[in-house]
Image (cartoon, rainbow, N blue to C red):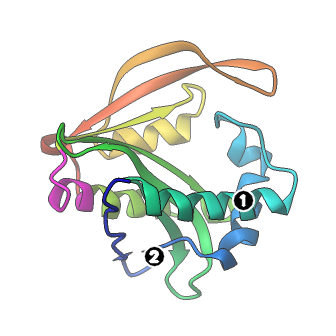
Amino acid sequence: MQTRLPQPELRSDRLRLREVRDSDAPALFAIHSNPQVMRYWSYPAWTELAQAAQKVADIQRQRRELDILVWAIADAASDRLIGTSAVFALDLTQGRAEIGYSLHPDWQGRGLAIEALRLILQYAFSDLHLRRVEADADPRNEPSWRLLEKLGFVREGLLRERWNVNDEICDTALYGLLRRDFKAG
């Protein structure tokens, strides 16, 4: 078993990025059962609350067993989970990792996703000493790839027909961000 990385709590005026808790399952279900959110993911929208409870358990297990960081993106005032972000496929020797994120539609359009990702990327580059972070986005998901580009990510390639979701074959655009290109604020 690998040594587990500590899960730091990250904060801004509007957000608290913290560990995912069992009590977050209903809010997580509200995100991952939403077809609008899941339209461009590599798996279909959830249909049962039990899927969210299982995901929370999976996150907790992964945190014990793997070098993965998973944050609940919570509203700072209420501490309610409004999204999630993960840094995974961490290779500290190579100085690289991948990042993923989601935000409930009711909270989109307020600059919260970019705020959360800036906190996480600042931690990844400063504290973990990564030199590169990668992300993939469905090329049709303009809000997602625009967010990545605002942070300094560069589209580096296209993987054709990478995913099959709900019987739809989808491409993936690969993005990379180097520490020197990160736009912290």
User: Is residue 111 something one can see in this rendering?
Assistant: no
Residue 36, percent across and down?
Answer: 74, 45
Residue under label 1: 54
- In the rendered structure, the answer to whether residue 92 lies left or right of residue 89 reads left
Q: Quadrant of residue 107?
A: bottom right
Q: Residue at x 26, y 38 (%)?
A: 177
Which dot marks residue 15? Answer: 2
Q: Quadrant of residue 3?
A: bottom left
Crowd class of label 1 (few under 14; some 14 to 19; many from 20; radius 10 Å)? few
**Depth order, front residue of 126/63:** 63
**Given the current orientation, which residue lies at the most extreme front position?**
1
**Depth order, front residue of 75/28:** 28
- Name the amino acid, label 1: Gln
Q: Is residue 182 above or below residue 74?
A: above
Q: CA distance from mark 2 to mark 1?
A: 25 Å
Q: Which residues are magenta?
A: 122-130
- Name the amino acid, label 2: Leu
Residue 141, percent across and down?
Answer: 58, 34
